Image (spheres, rainbow, N blue to C red):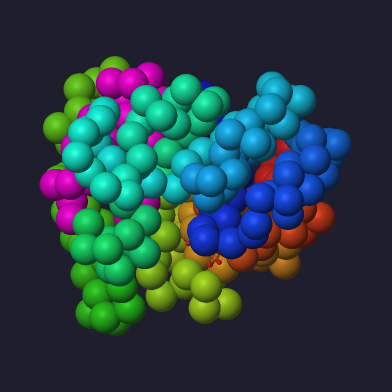
Amino acid sequence: MRKAIVAGNWKMNKGQNEAIECFTAMAAQSWPDHVQVVIAAPFTHLSSVAKFTESKSNFFLAAQNCHPEANGAFTGEVSIPMLKEIGVTHIIIGHSERREIFKEDNKFIARKVNAILEAGLIPIFCCGEPLSIRKSNNQQDYVEQQIQESLFQLGDSDIQKVIIAYEPIWAIGTGETASPDEAQEMHAAIRTMISERYNVEIADLISILYGGSVKPANADEIFSGHDVDGGLVGGASLDPVIFEQVINSYPA
Ligand code: 13P
């Protein structure tokens, strides 16, 4: 059975005190047992919020990025062992903002995937097409290339540990959401890609999250897609009360 996951990506938002307030509020919330909740906070807050995730067995801490090397002369970067040491269990990689603004390519992202798995942590691998590709109806080929070049080097046991987040770039922070049918269609296509490269059993074990303007008003419809195993939520994860509503929108 694949896992249900609702993850929040805070991006470059909140000071440390505000982060602690949010984690304190979340530790007191009640969530469905079958849903894993992950928060990706800015690097500087991770060590001070890690202890709050111990309040529940389904509460996890993520970083928003990492460098593939364990240490060395990479000024300004943060390594996977550094994150692991302070209690991070998941790492977002390949977010479209990293790809577009910081020019990260599929090959570099593949190195991060490999290093995260080698360290025993869980990559949340983001993929998704820009508007121009969606308009020309080439979104499945575009996403397939991202997945092929960053994930398909993995063996049968490692691929099962990856969480995939499909985030159409045109739906991120825009208020525009893929329709539940558009989300389901791409998620099913991703699962087919994986079953063709590996097999149906493996494809069935992989959680595929949808990201892009998920909020309480649309979460239950999006999460009801057969191949949609949860969400990667930006703006609506910043307020713990609103995010709790998104978490509780996951089907029972
Ligand atoms: P929004 O939910 O703000 O559209 O952001 C989505 C996202 O990029 C999560 O990683």
Vertical position of residue 194 compared to residue 57: above or below: below
Q: Position of residue 31 (x, y in %)?
A: 78, 37
* Residue closest to the eye, 149 or 238: 238
Q: Position of residue 38 (x, y in %)?
A: 59, 39
Vertical position of residue 138 compared to residue 197: above or below: below
Residue at 44% across, 31% down: 83
Q: Position of residue 110 (x, y in %)?
A: 20, 40
Vertical position of residue 79 compared to residue 179: above or below: above
Can residue 128 be seen here? The reply is no
Q: Which residues are magenta?
A: 105-127
State yes or no: residue 180 in magenta.
no
Q: Position of residue 25 (x, y in %)?
A: 82, 44
Quadrant of the drawing holding the C terminus: top right
Q: In screen coordinates, is 146 left or right of 119?
A: left
* Residue closest to the eye, 4 or 122: 122
Residue at 74% across, 59% down: 239
Residue at 36% across, 64% down: 97
Q: In screen coordinates, is 191 left or right of 25?
A: left
Can residue 18 be seen here? The reply is yes
Vertical position of residue 102 compared to residue 25: above or below: below
State yes or no: residue 121 in magenta.
yes
Residue at 19% across, 40% down: 73
Q: Give the tally of numbered discs.
A: 0
Q: Which image quadrant for residue 18?
A: bottom right
